[in-house]
Amino acid sequence: VANGEGDMPGGGPAAWMMTLGYDPQRERYVGTWIGSTMTHLWVYEGQLDEAGKTLALEAEGPGMTPGSTARYRDVIELVSDDQRTLTSCVLGDYGEWHRFMRAVYRRAR
């Protein structure tokens, strides 16, 4: 479980929560993401790379234009025991991923 809070550019304070686990029957990582900035519960599915350092999770959700849906990819990089990065991308019309957010998470001590 990962919890976060911070200020959104032009949007004030926000809070969010992510859950992740491994489903041995599907041989995939599964999880959810929910935040105070929207009403959609994101449901993830993905895989860890061979080095065990990068987890790519994909989900479908509301698109950037009203009434549309889109495919999203969140990539979590395990930088160290105390730090992770999260990079969020959306799939474009021509099959290319476009990065729209990057966050750094540090373990609370």
Image: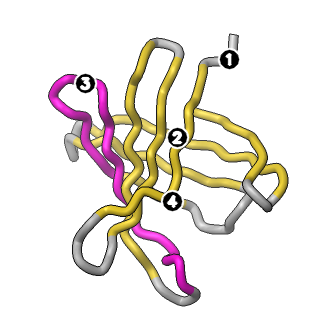
Residue 51 among magenta residues: yes
Tag nearer the camera, 1 or 4: 1
Q: Position of residue 18 (x, y in %)?
A: 56, 42
Taking the image as shown, residue 3 lies to the left or right of residue 58, namely right
- Image quarter in which the C terminus is found: top right
Tag nearer the camera, 2 or 1: 1
Dot 2 crowding, Cα within 10 Å, few <14, some 14–19, many 20+:
some
- Image quarter in which the N terminus is found: top right
Q: Going 26% across and 67% down the picture, which residue do you hit?
A: 96
First in sequence: mark 1 vs mark 3: 3
Mark 1 vs 4: CB contact within 8 A = no
Q: Going 42% across and 56% down the picture, which residue do you hit?
A: 99
First in sequence: mark 1 vs mark 4: 4
What SS does tag 3 mark? loop
Mark 2 vs 1: CB contact within 8 A = no
Amino acid at dot 4 = Trp
Chief SS of the magenta region: strand
Q: Going 35% across and 49% down the picture, which residue do you hit?
A: 57
Q: Which residues are magenta?
A: 45-65
Amino acid at dot 1 = Ala
Q: CA distance from mark 1 to mark 4?
A: 24 Å
Taking depth in this image into account, of 47 and 73 the one nearest to the observer is: 73
Q: Which residue is mark 1?
A: 108
What SS does tag 4 mark? strand
Q: Residue furthest right?
A: 12
Taking depth in this image into account, of 39 and 87 the one nearest to the observer is: 87
Amino acid at dot 3 = Gly
Can the viewer see residue 1 in this picture? no
Which circle marks residue 42 in the picture? 4
Q: CA distance from mark 3 to mark 4?
A: 23 Å
Q: CA distance from mark 1 to mark 3?
A: 23 Å
